[in-house]
Amino acid sequence: LEVSVVLSSDMLRELIAEDGAFDLILSDYHLGLDNENGLDVLLKAQKLQVEHPPKCILITGDTSAELTQSARENDIEVLYKPLRPVRLRAYLNALLESK
């Protein structure tokens, strides 16, 4: 796997322009940014990669029905904290095996 760390949707846009589309994007919901959260970044990624949509996963401790519904309506998987590394690894392995 080739991994990139992106800190905002602006940085994501630049990286996609330079290196091409992502296959998978994991984002925490709370990014510590004033103007966007992880869901915003994942939605932006989908808009930037229309021809090669990434698998998007939102990691959050927010269990509100509104956030879950919004994510799922946009084909974004939600994984809830606390998220054990073993569960995340198993989930990612299952994604890789299904390709």
Image (spheres, rainbow, N blue to C red):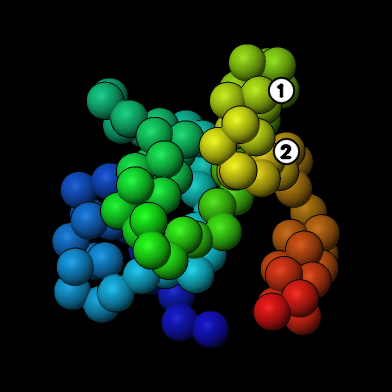
Name above or below for residue 97 compared with residue 64.
below
Q: Picture coordinates of residue 42 (x, y %)?
A: 44, 45
User: Tag 2: Cα neighbours inside 10 Å, few (<14), some, or many (≥20)?
Assistant: few
Q: Which of 65 and 3 is in front in this view?
A: 65
| Among the 4 quarters of the image, the one containing residue 70 | top right
Horizontal relation, residue 31 to residue 80: left or right: left
**What's the CA distance linking mark 1 and mark 2?**
7 Å
* Residue furthest bottom in the image: 1
Residue 80's disc number? 2
Q: Give how far across and how far down residue 19 sits, in percent.
A: 25, 77
Local secondary structure at mark 2:
strand
- Say which quadrant the C terminus sits in: bottom right
Image: 23 above or below 9: below
Q: Which of 92 and 98 is in front in this view?
A: 98
Identity of the amino acid at label 2? Tyr
Position of residue 22 in the picture relative to residue 86 (left or right): left
Name the residue located 19 percent from the left edge and 68 percent from the top edge.
Answer: 17
**Label of residue 63 in the image:** 1
Tag 1 and tag 2, C-beta contact below 8 Å: yes
- Mark 1 or 2, nearer chain start: 1
Q: How crowded is mark 1: few (under 14 residues within 10 Å), some or many (20 or more)?
A: few
Of 58 and 87, which appears nearest the observer?
58
Estimate the x, y position of residue 51 in percent, counting from the top left: 38, 63
Which amino acid type is shown beneath numbered disc 1? Thr
Q: Residue at x 68, y 16 (%)?
A: 64
- Number of labels in the image equals 2
